[in-house]
């Protein structure tokens, strides 16, 4: 019999009742260190008092308002995002995939209104993840997510991540934009080099293309900058944001320059819930904290410390951990054993993590972690690796005996 919930997820059999900062707590009071943060969503951890206050205050006033009316929280949030980034204008959505849908529509529409309507194609990268809608699975081009969902949305060309020659070769008369995650999250915590991002920016400028960044996972302080592209010293024309911006409330946003947004006039796009007052109240509260003096600098400091401890673990357990990678608090352990083995062993030690492609264990703690959480993570991963090594050893001696 089919599960009452459509069985599209492979769920861990744990039920959490509440959270406190970086910790998740079951009904029985078991505490787990949450290094998933809802997959880079809960940037301020669980039950952050400032977010709880913002949401409950707004809930007592006004939950929802159609976009046929002005929404003050959204106006304020847009102005603040504009002040903090390259952008001149913002469209609010409920999710990352919708922020990308808006980005893709905007790029096509830009060329439509600027006299190059044939430029509908977008160059994207192998290993990418852009969401689960029909357009975003086509944009990422991952066969695993497209199988059986054809016909696939046309208009995307895929090249190897980091391969500038392949990007150049893929640019044709119908190319309108380049779409990339500065750090591929689902793709295995693979960062594009700053030099590669600068080359993409230059290619876009030379060829009249729009640069679209997907910062749904790597944005909002995650890499130790407010947005990851700041490491490369470039700016995009369009950027999709979600996950961390809502701190756990469903919010996404498509940010753009005035030029790139040229075609998005009245009636061209919309969303019932996008920019909803509850969402705007929480996202403004997230921004209050993340843009506080010293917050992002502290992320860099904490991530340096965590990375150092992870490097120590790699030295101690070379038969389990092959590589530590990533930027800021978007970190990955590429494992020698199946990544799912380490994830399960860590969970037994009450440290939660998620997998990624390339046999990587992703570590995505809330940005508010401190020394105590780093120590707990170190101890948990250390114990998990020791257990796996013992199993490997037992298996080898069994093999030798046989
Ligand atoms: C999660 C994610 C998305 C999709 O976001 P949803 O909110 O699940 O639609 C898109 N791009 C990247 C890089 C992501 O990590």
Image (spheres, helix red, strand yellow):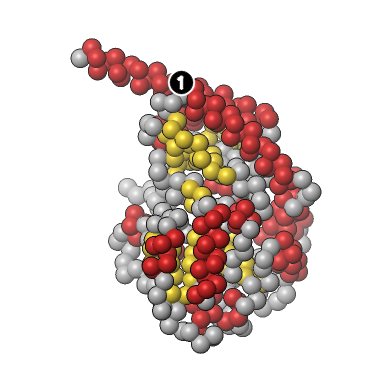
Q: Residue 237 at x, y = what percent?
A: 59, 69
Tell me if residue 212 can be seen.
no
Q: Residue 11 at x, y = what percent?
A: 44, 42
Q: Residue 325 at x, y = what percent?
A: 51, 40
- Residue at 69 percent of width and 38 percent of height: 301
How packed mark 1 is, by other alpha carbons closer than 10 Å (few <14, some 14-19, many 20 or more), is some
Residue 20, quarter of picture: top right
Residue 25, quarter of picture: top right
Q: Mark 1 sits on what residue?
A: 386
Q: Is residue 389 above or below residue 20?
A: above
Q: Is residue 160 above or below residue 108?
A: above
| Residue that extends furthest to the right in the rendered view of this protein | 293
Number of disc labels: 1
Tell me if residue 199 can be seen.
yes
Q: Is residue 149 left or right of residue 332?
A: left
Determine whether the residue tagged by mark 1 lies in a helix, strand or loop: helix
- Residue at 57 percent of width and 24 percent of height: 379
Is the CB atom of the residue marked by disc 1 within 8 angstroms of ligand 1's nearest atom?
Answer: no
Q: Residue 189 at x, y = what percent?
A: 49, 46
- Residue at 50 percent of width and 25 percent of height: 315
Q: Is residue 219 above or below residue 121?
A: above
């Amino acid at each position: 019999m089919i599960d009452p919930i459509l069985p599209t997820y492979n769920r861990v059999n744990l039920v959490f009742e509440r959270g406190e900062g970086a910790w998740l707590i079951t009904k029985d009071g078991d505490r787990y260190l949450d290094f998933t943060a809802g997959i880079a969503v809960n940037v301020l951890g669980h039950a952050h008092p400032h977010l709880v206050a913002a949401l409950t205050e707004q809930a007592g006033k006004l939950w929802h308002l159609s976009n046929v009316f002005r929404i003050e929280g959204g106006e304020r949030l847009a102005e603040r995002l504009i002040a903090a980034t390259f952008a001149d204008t913002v469209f609010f959505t409920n999710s990352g995939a919708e922020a990308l849908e808006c980005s893709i529509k905007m790029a096509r529409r830009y060329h439509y209104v600027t006299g190059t309507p044939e430029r509908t194609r977008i160059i994207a990268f192998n290993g990418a993840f852009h969401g689960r809608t029909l357009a975003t699975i086509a944009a990422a081009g991952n066969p695993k997510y497209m199988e059986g969902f054809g016909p696939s949305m046309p208009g995307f060309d895929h090249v190897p991540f980091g391969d500038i020659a392949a990007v150049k070769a893929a640019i044709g008369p119908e190319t309108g934009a380049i779409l990339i995650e500065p750090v591929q999250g689902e793709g295995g915590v693979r960062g594009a080099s700053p030099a590669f991002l600068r080359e993409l920016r230059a290619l876009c400028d030379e060829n009249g293309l729009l640069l679209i960044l997907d910062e749904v996972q790597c944005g909002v302080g995650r890499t130790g900058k407010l947005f990851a592209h700041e490491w490369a010293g470039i700016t995009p024309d369009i950027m999709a944001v979600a996950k961390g911006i809502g701190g756990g409330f469903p919010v996404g946003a498509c940010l753009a320059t005035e030029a790139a947004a040229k075609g998005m006039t009245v009636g061209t796009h919309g969303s019932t819930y996008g920019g909803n007052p509850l969402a705007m109240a929480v996202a403004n509260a997230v921004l209050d904290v993340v843009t506080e003096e010293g917050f992002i600098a502290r992320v860099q400091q904490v991530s340096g410390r965590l990375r150092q401890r992870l490097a120590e673990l790699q030295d101690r357990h070379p038969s389990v951990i092959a590589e530590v990678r990533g930027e800021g608090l978007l970190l990955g352990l590429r494992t020698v054993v199946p990544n799912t083995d380490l994830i399960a062993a860590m969970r037994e030690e009450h440290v939660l993590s998620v997998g990624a492609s390339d046999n990587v264990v992703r570590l995505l703690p809330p940005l508010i972690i401190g020394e105590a959480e780093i120590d707990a993570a170190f101890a948990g991963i250390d114990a998990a690796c020791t257990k796996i090594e013992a199993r490997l050893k037992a298996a080898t001696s069994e093999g030798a005996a046989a």
